Structure formats: structure tokens, C-alpha cells
Amino acid sequence: MFIGHFAVGFAAKKFAPRSSLAPLIAAPIFLDILWPIFILLGVERARIALGDTRFTPFDLYDFPWSHSLLMSAVWATAFAWIYFAATRYKPGAIAIWIGVVSHWVFDWITHRPDMPLYPGGSARLGLGLWNSVAGTMVVELTLLAAGVGLYISATRARDAIGRYAFAAYVLLLLAFYIGDRYSPLPASMNEVAWTAVVATFVMLLWAWWFDRHRLIRDS
């Protein structure tokens, strides 16, 4: 799951309109913020394995600290608590908690059985949607359309940045999603991890920027 996680962040703006879009998107991609850092530090491991599933060439065989169900709840609680302590905005904190945990649920749907329940556990879960390229793309594109639709229903542009930077962001997400599916294999997992770190930083900063140029629609 990739743009499906971003869809959750967009949709959350409908339920926590006073929250910046940046933390609302950071929440559902939070496990994937941690994962490349843990890969670079050697805390978790993965390998490039063409054909591991039809949609992605990565064998994610060791990532319990970022992606287990238990740690998802731990990270969700920590993120939501820090956000609430800083803002005192309860709807935003709730949206962030749900967003972080939603990552595990969506990955459980898409991954083959490699999703751990807790660090050290042997059980691995996954429904394997990634074994269908068409099914994966239909689900994720539908989720993105729904999430962006909810965001548009909750906000409106107050200037050109709020209109065109937002549109460019969505188009870039689509370009990343489709381009990554058909791009050459990366040279190493470190390359994957560094690319993810840089791209995440840019995408979160961009979301913060254009969201500041949009207004909350009247109920």
C-alpha cells in the first residue's frame, strides 16, 4: 500500500479540519517513515526479490519494530499523545491514532503473509492483494479518489498555491505510484531507504505548505 495511506491522511481533514494536513498524512505513513530509518540503522531487514509478489519486488522478512500490530498501536499512542500535548486538539489526536493503526490494517490487506503481530512472534498475516496488479491499483486509486474528495469537501483554496500546489501534489503522487511500479529495480535496499527518507520529507513539507493556503469550508 502506498497512495492508499496518503488517502487516509487526506480523508482525516474532514474529521479534524483544524489539524494541518502534514501530521494527518504523517500518521498513516508513519510506519513507513520509521521503516527506512530502521533499515539504514540495521534494526530491520529486507531484500530485493523480484517476483516475491506480482506488485512489488521486496521481501519484507524482518520489520517487527516498525510494522507489527503491537508496535503500530504503540507508535499511534505516542504520536497522538505528543500531538495532543502540543495542540490540545482532540479530533486531531484521534485522527492521528487511527491513521497510524490504519497502516497495519491496509498492509495486512495488501501484503502476502509477512505482517507480524508483535516483535519476536512467529505468526505472519496478510491477504496478498499485491499478488494482483490490477486489483491493487484499483483499490489504491479508489482510496485516493475518495480521500482527495473528502479533503476537497472540507477545504477550499484561498489562492493559487492552495489550488495548484495541491493539484500538483496529487498528480505527483499518481506519477510516483505508476512510475515506481514500472521503474527498474533499485540497486540496494539502502538506495530504497534513502529515497524514501528524502521523498517523505519533501511530501510532508509540501502538504503543510499547500494546506496553509486552503480554508476550512463552512459546515
Image (cartoon, rainbow, N blue to C red):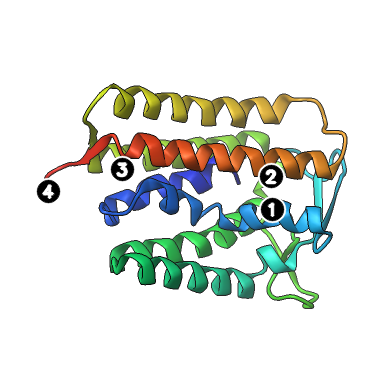
Q: Which residue is mark 2?
A: 130
Mark 3 in CB contact with mark 4 (< 8 angstroms): no
Above or below, comparing residue 148 to residue 64 in the picture: above
Nearer mark to the viewer, of 1 and 4: 4
> Between 7 and 23, which is closer to the camera in this rendering?
23
Is tag 3's residue or tag 2's residue first in the polypeptide sequence? Answer: 2
Badge 2 element: helix
Q: Residue 216, image x and y in percent? A: 20, 43
Q: Does 58 sit left or right of 108 as displayed?
A: right
Q: Quadrant of residue 51?
A: top right
Q: Quadrant of residue 180?
A: top right
Nearer mark to the viewer, of 2 and 4: 4
What residue is at 71 percent from the left and 38 percent from the top?
A: 195
Q: Which residue is mark 3?
A: 150
Above or below, comparing residue 111 to residue 210 in the picture: below
Callout 1 environment at 10 Å: few (<14), some (14 to 19), or many (20+)?
Answer: many
What residue is at 33 percent from the left and 61 percent from the top?
A: 92
Q: State the mark number for residue 111.
A: 1
Mark 2 in CB contact with mark 1 (< 8 angstroms): yes
In space, the residues marked 3 and 2 are separated at their CA atoms by 26 Å
Badge 3 element: helix
What residue is at 82 percent from the left and 33 percent from the top?
A: 186
Q: Which residue is mark 4?
A: 219
Is tag 3's residue or tag 4's residue first in the polypeptide sequence? Answer: 3
